[in-house]
Amino acid sequence: MLFKTKMIPLVGAIALAMAGSAFAQETVVKIGHVAPMSGGQAHYGRDNANGAIMAVEDLNAKGFMIGGKKVKFELLAEDDAADPKQGTAAAQKLVDAKVNGVIGHLNSGTTIPASKIYFDAGIPQISPSATNPKYTQQGFNTAFRVVANDGQLGGTLGRYAVTNLKGKSIAVIDDRTAYGQGVADEFVKGAKAKFPGVQIVQQYTNDKATDFNAILTSIKAKKPDVVFFGGMDNVAGPMLRQMKQLGINAKFMGGDGICTTELAKLAGDGMSDNQVICAEAGGVTGPQQKVMDDFVARYKKRFNLDVQIYAPYVYDAVMTMATAMQKAGSADPAKYLPALAKIQYQGVTGTIAFDSKGDIKDGSLTLHTYRGGKKEKLAVVK
């Protein structure tokens, strides 16, 4: 008995030592994520954050290895409220926390100023949703994105407006944000390149506006065939309702900022079937569609919510970054950055590979409309 009594603490000590050793070997990899988690665009932010949560959960569940060692991923989430100043503050907070990489930001207006902070710190950044071309034109080798940019998105919509919708008189409204202005400018370029004789009138609002009567009354006098809005769904919804009240029956177009499941709720009875045409910066076809459908079903089961728009791209951005770390054998930003630049990753949203600027190669777009209050795919285009 005396022997056994002495052995119990000895065995316990060995077990604790082994557990401590195993714990010491498990490296923590910090992934920062930034999106608007408060304010009018919080539903986008929640969608993005959920995509990141799913990716981190999946990586940890599979016992992900980097450099022959098991790692544990931790998500450090920050709220930038779609505000550039708050966005740079969030970026500095993540840099100070010594994150290994950043997924975000959601908006171009926050992503672009934050990208300088990450670049100066040498921390790789993948935006899952910022589409303004300037983001990857600053010469920052730390900046990447997994969606097509506004040059592709806005230009495609502009060509569609004059070719498919036969628009001859078009009103363009933008919210003066980096995203809204950028996609509107590219829309105008695309429309004019395809049909130089198109008549375009431009108006401006802001990303928190709710009253558009003055703008819309001015537009109504021009009898537009198409109204294009560069901005987000929380502004587009009320705008559609007020268009109906004023008897403006034009087609309503916009980029990925309005192309959400939430738009139908925000517009209410202001949206008629097939009235809205929008483009999502991404898209899948063929066998890849089943992969996307499976993700959407898993997302619904995990969060009891429908995907708004960007969650699959956020998921892929996290997985792409983790794969680059694995290929480099290190989560050290300086060591895995070259592997990230050369990555070839098959994700939920398709093959992810970056060009020399950090833009996704062969980015696709998905055109959608709304019928019966539900978003429906029209076509995937390159």
Image: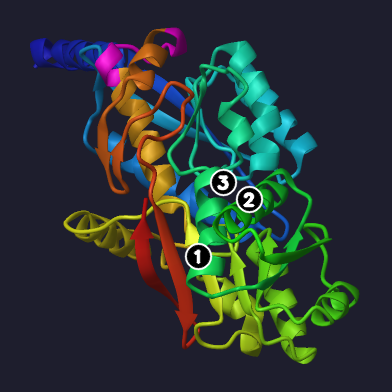
Residue at left offset 55%, top offset 44%: 151
Tell me, yes or no, if residue 296 can be seen here: yes
N-term-proximal mark, 3 vs 1: 3
Amino acid tagged 2: Lys
Q: How far apart, in angstroms, are the residues tagged by discs 1 and 2?
A: 12 Å
Name, please, the residue furthest toward the front. Answer: 197
Residue at left offset 68%, top offset 64%: 229
Report the residue marked by disc 2: 189
Q: Is residue 73 above or below residue 167?
A: above
Where does residue 357 sit, x and y in percent of width and height? 49, 23
N-term-proximal mark, 3 vs 2: 3
As helix, strand or loop, the secondary structure at mark 2 comes to helix
As helix, strand or loop, the secondary structure at mark 1 comes to helix
Q: Which residues are magenta?
A: 326-334
Where does residue 327 sit, x and y in percent of width and height? 25, 17
Q: Nearer the viewer, mark 3 or mark 2?
A: 2
Q: In front here: 58 or 108?
A: 108
Report the residue marked by disc 1: 160
Report the residue marked by disc 3: 150
As helix, strand or loop, the secondary structure at mark 3 comes to helix
Residue at left offset 52%, top offset 21%: 99
Mark 2 nearby-residue class (10 Å; few <14, some 14–19, many ≥20) = some
Q: Image quadrant of residue 227?
A: bottom right
Q: Image quadrant of residue 218?
A: bottom right
Q: In front here: 48 or 5?
A: 48
Q: How far apart, in angstroms, are the residues tagged by discs 3 and 2?
A: 11 Å
Amino acid tagged 1: Tyr
Amino acid tagged 3: Asp
Tell me, yes or no, if residue 260 can be seen here: no
Mark 1 nearby-residue class (10 Å; few <14, some 14–19, many ≥20) = many
Where does residue 297 sit, x and y in percent of width and height? 29, 64
Mark 3 nearby-residue class (10 Å; few <14, some 14–19, many ≥20) = many
